[in-house]
Amino acid sequence: SYNNVGSLGSIVTNFSTDGSVSPTLTVPNATNGMVSMMFGDPSAAGGFGTFSGFNKTSRFNNTTDSVGAYMMIGDAKHPPTLTFTASQSWSLPWGAIGVPLIP
């Protein structure tokens, strides 16, 4: 959980259905707060969809297919524009969502 959150900014999403191995999510225009985000891969293809090389603070990284999907959850303090990146271990579809947390 996060303390001192007064409101949520505009939710931002991104996805790839063409199997990009470089997920990215850019969250613009939220100041003085934090962004919580998630990369997800719904395939659960025997370990091929795992995420690594996250460029911000990782809070959770499911590297097994026990829940039927792979996901990485992380956050970062938000400058005017913030870009999250990671690497995916195989060319599979992925999705991303980011939520600005404003004090």
Image (cartoon, rainbow, N blue to C red):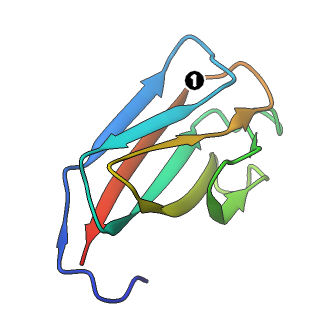
- Looking at the rendered structure, the number of numbered marks drawn on it comes to 1
Please state if 63 lies on the left or on the right of 102 as rendered. Answer: right
- Binning the other alpha carbons within 10 Å of mark 1 as few (below 14), some (14 to 19) or many (20 upward) gives some
Residue 44 image point, x, y percent: 70, 38
Point 35% across, 43% down: residue: 27
Q: Quadrant of the N terminus?
A: bottom left
The answer to whether residue 68 is above or below residue 24 is below
Q: What is the residue that sits farthest to the top in this orientation?
A: 18
Q: For residue 6, what is the image quadrant?
A: bottom left
Please state if 20 lies on the left or on the right of 49 as rendered. Answer: left
Residue 50 image point, x, y percent: 75, 41
Q: Which residue is mark 1?
A: 93
The answer to whether residue 24 is above or below residue 84 is above
Residue 3 image point, x, y percent: 36, 89
Point 40% across, 31% down: residue: 14
Point 50% across, 62% down: residue: 76
Q: For residue 62, what is the image quadrant?
A: bottom right
Residue 98 image point, x, y percent: 38, 50
* Residue sitting nearer the eye, 79 or 11: 79
Q: Amino acid at mark 1?
A: Pro
Q: Quadrant of the C terminus?
A: bottom left
Q: What is the residue that sits farthest to the bottom in this orientation?
A: 3
* Residue sitting nearer the eye, 69 or 87: 87
The answer to whether residue 77 is above or below residue 90 is below
Mark 1 element type: loop
